[in-house]
Image (cartoon, rainbow, N blue to C red):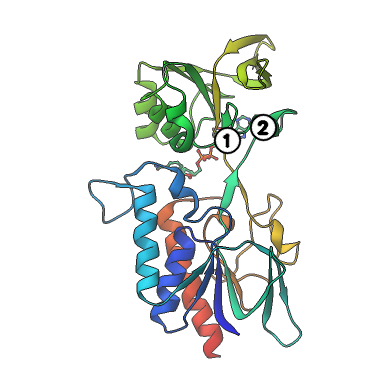
Amino acid sequence: MENVIIIGTGCAGYTAAIYTARANLTPLLLSGSQPGGQLTTTTDVENFPGFPEGIMGPDLMMKMQAQAEKFGARIEYSQVEKVEKTPEGHFDLTMGDGKVIQSKTVIVATGASPRHLGLPNEKSLIGRGLTSCATCDGAFYRNVPVAVIGGGDSAAEEANFLTRFASTVYLIHRREELRASKIMADRVLANPKVKPIWNSTVSEYLTDEKGEMRAVTLKNLVTGEENELELKCVFVAIGHVPNTQFLNGSVTTDENGYIVQSEGTRTNIPGLFAAGDVADHVYRQAITAAGQGCAAALEAERYLAH
Ligand code: NAP
């Protein structure tokens, strides 16, 4: 029987691992489908304290992993399908391959995944001109027009990054001002390769004969007018959906699927804690996720002590 299982290896998961490992609880981390979490898909992180020159997202996550492992945390690369609290008071975690692992406490730090528009041919276009990761796919689109959808920090950051490769980066936003922080908004709007398209949304993805992205239909939300915009790739940056599906409704969530916390990182199930973007739709920063990971670890430690 494990003392602590941490589901997720983003900032929250690794921080929880560092704290529980240093408390001699030998935590087991289950990595899920995106080891390292969302920061592995970003470039420069300029606002994580301690790195005045900035640090690359993947480097930061490798350092967190090394720090957790140094104190005895173990990492297993598997996907959790189900979490159940047993009448005896421990948890049964069922993996994708059917294996069941038992633990006295669980910290859910599964983060959130990119949201898509919900257009009909979306799924078939992923990897064929539709993506949510400029860092992963930007370099494939050199000297061709691309678009970013969204108006938040992610959209601003992705659009700026893509100007290294693309001929033009259209920034398609449904309103006429960005939600992004002022510094990011100013930076992206000052970039001559970025062409904002305000009050607009993509109503259709159009493909070529090979089934790859050729253009989009743009709909102006003020005039209702529609027109076609030729491009090679669309980077969707319209927020995230929390990864709580595997909990099958057993843990209380809000209407958007975010886990509801009380008294810090506690959930409605004693012994099961939640940390980071899976529960936080307000701050959603690397440092706040790390802070919650720390809090969840301390809560788990106290729960075990009692
Ligand atoms: P976000 O702040 O929630 O922004 C999502 C954007 O997508 C908004 O502009 C929203 O439009 C738009 N949107 C949502 N649903 C849409 C739809 N169906 N169709 C069209 N547009 C839609 O998400 P985010 O940019 O991913 O940022 C998440 C958090 O991470 C934020 O707290 C952000 O500050 C942080 N972050 C920080 C950094 C950094 O500091 N380096 C980088 C990336 C992210 P409206 O504006 O009209 O709502």
Q: CA distance from mark 2 to mark 1?
A: 8 Å
Say which amino acid is labelled 1: Ile
* Mark 1: few/some/many CA within 10 Å (<14, 14-19, 20+): many
Q: How many marks?
A: 2
Give me the residue at 38% from left, 23% from top. 163
Which amino acid, mark 2?
Answer: Leu
Q: Which residue is mark 1?
A: 238
Point 75% across, 28% down: residue: 120
Q: Which mark is drawn over residue 306?
A: none
Determine whether the residue tagged by mark 1 lies in a helix, strand or loop: loop
Please say if the residues under marks 2 and 1 sit with CB atoms less than 8 Å apart: yes
Residue count near mark 2 (Cα–Cα under 10 Å), binned few <14, some 14–19, many ≥20: some
Residue 210 lies in what quarter of the image?
top right
Residue 226, percent from left and from top: 67, 10
Q: Is residue 210 above or below residue 95?
A: above
Tell me the SS state at disc 2. Answer: loop
In the rendered image, the quadrant that contains the C terminus is bottom right
User: Quick one: label 2 or label 1, which is nearer the N terminus?
Assistant: 2
On residue 117, the disc is: 2
> Quick check: 196 above or below 264?
above
In the image, 111: left or right of 66?
Answer: right
Residue 56: x, y in percent? Answer: 33, 46
Identify the image quadrant of residue 24.
Answer: bottom left
Q: Residue furthest bottom?
A: 306
Q: Would you say the beta carbon of the disc 2 residue lies within 8 angstroms of ligand 1? A: yes
Q: Depth check: 68 or 263 in front?
A: 68
Residue 294 horizontal side relative to residue 218, left or right: left
Label 1 CB, ligand 1: below 8 Å?
yes
